[in-house]
Amino acid sequence: MNSGVLYAALAYTAWGLFPIFFKQLGNVNAFEVVMHRTVWSLAFLLCVLAVLRRWAWLRGVASQPRVLAAFALSALLLSVNWSVYVWAIQNAHVVDASLGYFILPLVNVAFGFAFLHERPRPVQWLAVAVAGAGVLWLTLQAGRLPWVALVLAATFGVYGLLRKVAALGALEGLTLETLLLAPFALGLLAWWAWHGQGALVQGDPSTLGWLLLAGPLTAIPLLLFAAGARRIPMATLGILQYISPSLQMLLGVWLYGEVFDPARAIGFYLIWLALVVYSLDSLWNSRKQPAKQPVIVS
């Protein structure tokens, strides 16, 4: 349990600081950034596997269509999440992106109920309802659904669920996801380069350096998250998740000067109230339960 908390907290801290990184790539199309993230993440992961000499799992996975299908789905969700997130950062929607990850813990409650047979307590359902009221207020105030936030919360919520019950460990699972995405990413990058487009042809050394750095900066937090998600309950994962959107929101408002007017703040206040209620209930019930022996998950 303790190692799972540490892994997840480090992952969320890294994600909370991601806007600083992706602002450096504002001159590169968001979808192209995601293709580079995929390719350079795979290169980094293959180096890690080579150092650890952990290749045997590939032979087994190749003969399991259901495992391949599950990881193809998680890879697709990951690419959608990445694309929307990078677009949001590049187009001054850092606060909207933070909202998605504020909603995510409550999405985890709903998914745990629907798919993992977890039984949320009445106070947890109250928190979900209050957060729903906050989203409704933001929708009415803006005249449209906060689609950036909802897409980010839904895609990463399902991704976290799939990784929690995945047949592979953190390193192997992420490598398989990037392997499945890599042919598409490499094909697109090659096509753009052939036609004299894209950062590989038009980018300056600084831009290329930032894109190369996207590999380890993408892979390491995801490895930490996957390792943490396999070791701790969804509820604990949800509480730790507040680290990331809090850092993102502070960056959006204080560093990048995004608008946070009083009318919009009401929706956020409702969601924060829901998170406070949810967290207090989780802490209260965790203290009442007897301690369990730790389980080591490889």
Image (spheres, helix red, strand yellow):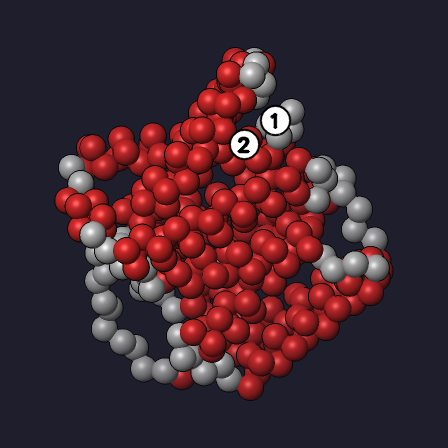
The answer to whether residue 2 shows anywhere in this view is no
Judge left or right: residue 144 versus residue 23.
Answer: right
Camera-nearest residue between 190 and 248 = 190
Vertical relation: 162 (above or below) 36? below
Question: Whole-Å distance between the Cαs marked 1 and 2?
Answer: 7 Å
Q: Would you call the spot at circle 1 few (<14 residues within 10 Å), some (14-19), or many (20 or more)? A: some
Residue drawn at (52%, 73%), measured in percent from left and top?
Answer: 110
Q: Residue at x 27, y 47 (%)?
A: 172
Q: Quadrant of the C terminus?
A: bottom left
- Secondary element at image label 1: loop
The image position of residue 136, as x and y in percent, is 75, 68
Residue at 47% over, 77% down: 113
Q: Which residue is mark 1?
A: 28
Instruction: Find residue 33 and name its label.
Output: 2
Q: Is residue 124 visible?
A: yes
Of residue 209 and residue 84, the one placed in the foreground of this image is 84
Image mark for residue 198: none
Is there CB contact under 8 Å for labels 1 and 2? Answer: yes
